[in-house]
Amino acid sequence: MLPFDYQQRTRIVFGAGAVSRLGELSRELGATRVLVVTDPGVVAVGHAARAVSALRGAGLFAVVFDAVRENPDATDVERCLVAARECGADLLVGLGGGSSMDTAKGANFLLTNGGKMEDYKGIGKASKPMLPLIAIPTTAGTGSECQSFALISDPVTHLKMACGDPKAAARIAILDPELTVSLPLRVTACTGMDALVHALETAVTKKRSPLSQLFSREAFRLCLEALPQVLANPADLDARGRMLLGAAYAGTAIENSMLGCAHSAANPLTAHFGVVHGQAVGRLIPGVILRNLSDPDAACEYQALARIAGLESAGALVEKVSEISRLAGLGAGLGSLGVTASAVPQMALEAAAQWTASFNPVSFTVGDFESLYLEALA
């Protein structure tokens, strides 16, 4: 049995219509002035209005910052910081996908501890208490609602900085499947594939524990079953709920076991070619699994995941994941997405330097990353 030290930092409130409880939950945390951090798409479908209505209905002052961009960088965080100061916020709400939740966390670092975003790269760099955060995902993907990390891009290199601190974790995560029904099908596919890969990677990392594996396995079971269902019937609220819960469980697994080389290799693809993160990890994970099978413990865990999927072997698991990727419309080779072979050496160097690579069960050299990219081009 592997040793572990587990502390549940985030209360999970799950259920259709749960966003209506935002006001009462905010009051429980002592809030009086709330900044809702979100993006224009979430505003357009009315989710921000529902959140504000719940807050104001509880007698709280609420302001919306709706300028979050996909893959936010330090400048996005600075803009959110200005809004938080102007609002006099004593509680932050991250409403949206991982980008909104990460921006809220990033602003929280700077608002309470000062400095710049790069000062918090790594773990435990915040010396002062941080404001309470409520996370409300509108996508079933990143699992950021159950993590203490903000992933913020460097505005110059565009590579992601992982800024983590236990104090940055959301106090409460509200999981309301009604908020995910309005997602475009491609966003559902990309975020859902991200959640599925989170489950696959966290299950085998060097930092895994018996407890984190419970979350990984249940996340894998939920996402494997529910993702094809929501792709076939986007209005299936039950399947949407299982995807949302699976993504949160996978996020909890990340918090306790980290990720591996599929994520290390995905970040340069997004930075250099704008490949959507979920599509990138979905295309790369089969090659990572095949290489990880050389580790006996990882191979044993993949076999356990295969049994959960009703499959006989880890090899069949690789094909099943590839099948779901194709079903989601994400099976295209990286070459068709504009990725060039000439960029592979530089991306391989960057992937090997990513923090998550150090947790992979099998060590990847720069050459291994080059091979992984080249295989995925076709």
Image: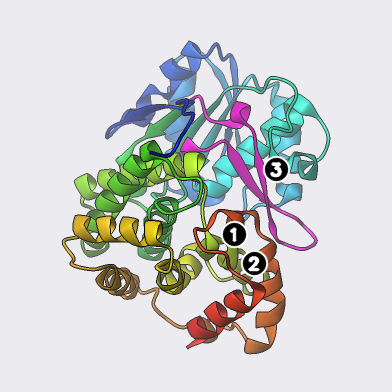
Report the disc number at residue 357: 1
Quarter of the picture containing the N terminus is top left
- Residue 144 visible within the image: no
Residue carrying label 3: 122
- Ranked by sequence position, the earlier of labels 2 and 1 is 2
Q: Secondary structure at mark 3?
A: strand
List x then y, in percent, for residue 230: 25, 57
**Is 168 inside the magenta-drawn segment?**
yes
**Is 223 inside the magenta-drawn segment?**
no
Mark 2 residue type: Ala
Classify residue 312 as left or right of residue 288: left
Mark 3 residue type: Gly
Which callout, 2 or 1, points to the residue nearer the camera? Answer: 1
List x then y, in percent, for residue 361: 49, 58
Q: Residue at x 46, y 28 (%)?
A: 6
In which quarter of the view is residue 158 placed?
bottom right
Which callout, 3 or 1, points to the residue nearer the camera? Answer: 1
In the image shown, does 122 or 367 lie closer to the viewer? Answer: 367
CB contact under 8 Å: marks 3 and 2? no
Q: Residue at x 39, y 65 (%)?
A: 186
Q: Residue at x 57, y 49 (%)?
A: 99
- Ranked by sequence position, the earlier of labels 3 and 1 is 3
Mark 1 residue type: Ala
In which quarter of the view is residue 176 placed?
top left
List x then y, in percent, for residue 291: 45, 72
Classify residue 132 as left or right of residue 155: left
Q: Residue at x 43, y 58 (%)?
A: 194
- Mark 1 Cα within 10 Å, few/some/many (few <14, many 20+)? many
Q: Which residues are magenta?
A: 145-171
Q: Secondary structure at mark 1?
A: helix
